[in-house]
Image (cartoon, rainbow, N blue to C red):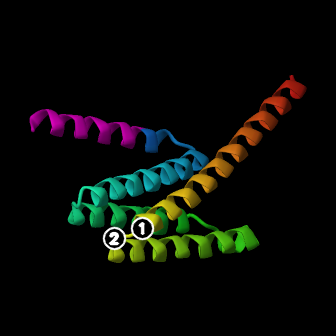
Amino acid sequence: MVAHNAARAYAQIGIETGVAAASPHGMIMMLYDGAILAIAEAKSHLAAQRIPNKGQAISRAISIIDEGLRASLDLRRGGKIASDLEQLYDYMNRRLLLASLRNDAAGLTEVSGLLRELREAWADIAHTVESQSALTQQVAA
């Protein structure tokens, strides 16, 4: 039990360090990763019939989507993309709630897939920005 608590504390320190050092883009990536991980945990708990744990993991995923991803949207400056993402995040949360109520693994899989697609697109944007930045620095030198 002590080793488990020590490992958990060490992991928490790693997360806190990552958050403190992350760029805004990195923070969004961490939120996607956290929501995907929470859903994977919920699926594992569902399969093992650990229903209270499943509910806690789904609640964590919903919180990450709502209080992290959705809250980070700038609807004024983000235009249609931000509005569409807000609606998609709302759909994901409703789908997760139904999946929790119905013990529906397919709903968990659906939302996890949507989050993975968004994460992949976000990673592609980061790669493009980094490439353009490196090119700009080479031209300036």
Q: Is residue 132 on the magenta stretch?
A: no
Tag in front: 1 or 2: 2
Q: Residue at x 78, y 30 (%)?
A: 134
Residue 104 vertical position relative to residue 25 in the rendered view, above or below: below
Residue 54: image location, x then y, percent:
29, 62
- Which quadrant of the view contains residue 18? top left
Which residue is more in the foreground, 75 or 56? 56
Element class at badge 2: loop
Predominant secondary structure, magenta span: helix
Q: How much space separates mark 1 and mark 2, taking CA atoms?
A: 15 Å
Which residue is more in the foreground, 98 or 78? 98
Q: What amino acid is found at the position of numbered circle 1 in the picture?
A: Ile
Residue 25 vertical position relative to residue 68 in the rendered view, above or below: above
The residue where tag 2 is placed is 103
Residue 132: image location, x then y, percent:
81, 37
- Crowd rating for badge 2 (residues with CA inside 10 Å; few <14, some 14–19, many 20+): many
Element class at badge 1: helix
The residue where tag 1 is placed is 62
The residue segment tinted magenta is: 1-17
Residue 113 vertical position relative to residue 89 in the rendered view, above or below: above
Residue farthest along the top direction in this orientation? 141
Residue 56: image location, x then y, percent:
28, 64
Q: Quadrant of the C terminus?
A: top right
Q: Quadrant of the N terminus?
A: top left
Which residue is more in the foreground, 111 or 69? 111
The reply to whether the C-beta atoms of the residues labelled 1 and 2 are less than 8 Å apart is: no
Residue 2: image location, x then y, percent:
10, 35
Q: Residue at x 68, y 73 (%)?
A: 84
Q: Residue at x 44, y 61 (%)?
A: 64
Tell whether 49 sits left or right of 61. Answer: left
Q: What amino acid is found at the position of numbered circle 2 in the picture?
A: Asn
